[in-house]
Amino acid sequence: MNPLSPCGTRCTQCARFPLQCAGCETIQGKVWWLQYTGAERCAVYDCCVLQNGYSNCGGCARLPCERFTKDPTISDEENKAHLSVMLQNLKAEKQENKEQPLYCILVTGIPASGKSTLAQFIADELKLPLFSKDKIKEILFDTVGFRSREEKVALGTAAMDIMYHAAEQLMQRSLPFLLENNFENASKKRLLEILKDYGYTAVTVMLTGDYRTIYQRMIDRDLRPDRHRGHIVNDRYPSDILTPSPNISFDLYVAGIKARGMDTFTANGPHFTVDTTNPDKMNLQSVLQKLIDIINNLQSDTIS
């Protein structure tokens, strides 16, 4: 019998084992405390073992999820302590079995498609480190600044280098993470080299939609007061006088997307496209679940 339950509890360390409870694997998730919840089976066991075929939750991208319920017979402090131990057990088991694949998530797409918003949502939900090229650029704009278009482009290159350096630090520690950027053809060579060097698989989430609608969203975004001024000027920043650069035409906007491969970019792993023409109709939870399914499938492939 597996001494570790799907939730991370070690059955042999439980006072009810083996006389009152023979262990989760034997009783198939029909644990004693269900009398307090009214359920027929533990939700963690049902999801982990019956629905996904795993021995425990150690490799799940959403650990711990809402299925980890509180024990109503003990205090909140005791529940918190128990959960901490369970997560430690799952982490130790995962490292011992090396079941967790090495992966990262790339959120990319055309300008103004909503990359930053979606990336932050995914990072928050999956508790992943997030590195955004634009956020790094904004820090460089404010601390280093630029006095020409050439210097601004150089800061963009530096931001990419910093983002990749941070990614490599996490890869060296076999940790998952998320990168947000409008990845394009020019970005691909170095990215693929890093992924190969560390044995990582990149899952790409591509954001695109109706070009005309998203182009107008880009124009409107640059007029918002919360838009960082460094993105919309080319001659000098910081400066007391900020003269926005003229907006590119729609034709140039589309030509740039096509020429740079912004909405066809893929790395070395699974990828899927999200239509963000109408952000209000985008189901964030559906996107998240699709991503989780892909990550969990990576684990299945690693195990097999």
Image (tube, rainbow, N blue to C red):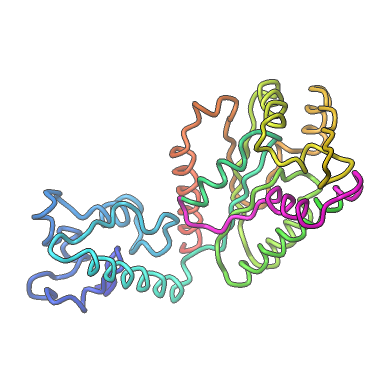
On screen, residue 94 versus residue 186, left or right, reads: left
Residue 293 lies, in percent from the top left, at: 45, 48
Q: Give the overall secondary structure of the magenta segment.
A: helix
**Residue at point 18% right, 61% down?**
71
Residue 76 lies, in percent from the top left, at: 22, 63
Give residue 226's quadrant in the image: top right
Q: How many marks?
A: 0
On screen, residue 28 versus residue 188, left or right, reads: left
Q: Quadrant of the N terminus?
A: bottom left
From which residue to which does the magenta span run? 125-153
**Residue at point 58% right, 30% down?**
275
Q: Residue furthest front?
A: 240
Residue 87 lies, in percent from the top left, at: 36, 68
Camera-nearest residue between 177 and 42:
177
Magenta-drawn stretch contains 147:
yes
199 over 242 or under it: above or below: below
**Residue at point 15% right, 59% down?**
72
Camera-nearest residue between 198 and 240:
240
Residue 298 lies, in percent from the top left, at: 51, 56
Magenta-drawn stretch contains 295:
no
Camera-nearest residue between 117 and 224:
224
120 over 26 or under it: above or below: above
**Residue at point 92% right, 45% down?**
148
Give residue 10's quadrant in the image: bottom left
On screen, residue 241 versus residue 168, left or right, reads: right
